[in-house]
Amino acid sequence: MQRRKFTSGALAASVLAGLQLPAKASLQSLSETDAATGIRAALERGAVAAVGLLGKTDGFLGNPKVRIELPGFLNDAARFLKATGQQKRVDELITAMNRAAEAAVPQAKTLLVSAVKNMSVEDARNILTGGDDSATQFFAGKTREPLSEKFLPIVTKATEKVSLADKYNAVAGRASSLGLLRKDQANVQEYVTGKALDGLFLIIGEEERKIRQDPIGTGSAILKKVFGALK
């Protein structure tokens, strides 16, 4: 048998061919294993990133997208208090509310990662083919209630340090009975817990959209393969 001879050009072409990426996979060609693995990787990456961004000093207070303000009627009342020289007390309460959320968020990591690891293949397929926030909705459905239970005592401990918190509850309770505030805004601890979760899922949603829009930029081969199939 005649031994095949390679010119330098043929050798280079051969090497490049070996390095060439396969043609972009179509959604139909993805295996269930690849789809589930990619979705799990995306969800865990987004969850961990969101917790890292929010669960630190000024994660909420310094981010206008998630900063927790006083709700409706009480925000109007706060403007009156500021006008009467009590701005410092109002600012202390708002800072305490945001610090409480920042303290609570790191507790979310374990539950979020557990939800990812326990998701079904069907969940993965639904998320992959769903809208830009389908992963976020998955997290909210699986973890919002247990996270609320974890967050509440942390938020309660943090807000108890501010004397105005008790006055918030007294005033907000009366306002709620008069229809001026929603029931979930009538207690500062429950209100902050809810807003902390809203902020967490909002940032997870932003991380999810980043992965969908630029899977190559993640540097992850499986994310590129799975989300690249949607392009």
Image (spheres, rainbow, N blue to C red):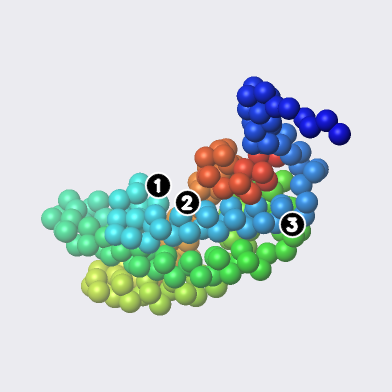
Q: Nearer the viewer, residue 96 or 222?
A: 222
Three-letter amino acid code at the position of disc 3? Thr
Crowd band around label 2 with a 10 angstrom C-alpha radius: few (<14), some (14–19), many (20+)? many
Q: Is residue 202 left or right of residue 84?
A: right
Numbered circles on residues, count: 3
Q: Quickly name the residue at label 1.
A: 65
Q: Position of residue 121 (x, y in %)?
A: 74, 60
Q: Position of residue 9 (x, y in %)?
A: 64, 22
Three-letter amino acid code at the position of disc 2? Ile
Q: Nearer the viewer, residue 82 or 223?
A: 223
Q: Position of residue 7 (x, y in %)?
A: 67, 23
Q: Nearer the viewer, residue 8 or 125?
A: 8
Q: Height in image: 40 above or below 114?
A: above
Taking the spot 29% from the left edge, 59% from the top edge, the residue there is: 57
- Whole-number angstrom distance, CA of label 2 to CA of label 3: 27 Å
- Whole-number angstrom distance, CA of label 1 to CA of label 3: 36 Å
Q: Quickly name the residue at label 2.
A: 203
Judge depth for marks 2 and 3 and give the one in front: 3
Of label 2 and label 3, which has the lower sequence position?
3
Taking the spot 38% from the left edge, 61% from the top edge, the residue there is: 55
Image quadrant where residue 90 sits? bottom left
Taking the spot 73% from the left edge, 27% from the top edge, the residue there is: 5
Dot 1 falls on a residue whose secondary structure is loop
Disc 1 to disc 2: CB gap under 8 Å: yes
Q: Quickly name the residue at label 3.
A: 33
Of label 1 and label 2, which has the lower sequence position?
1
Crowd band around label 3 with a 10 angstrom C-alpha radius: few (<14), some (14–19), many (20+)? few
- Whole-number angstrom distance, CA of label 1 to CA of label 2: 9 Å
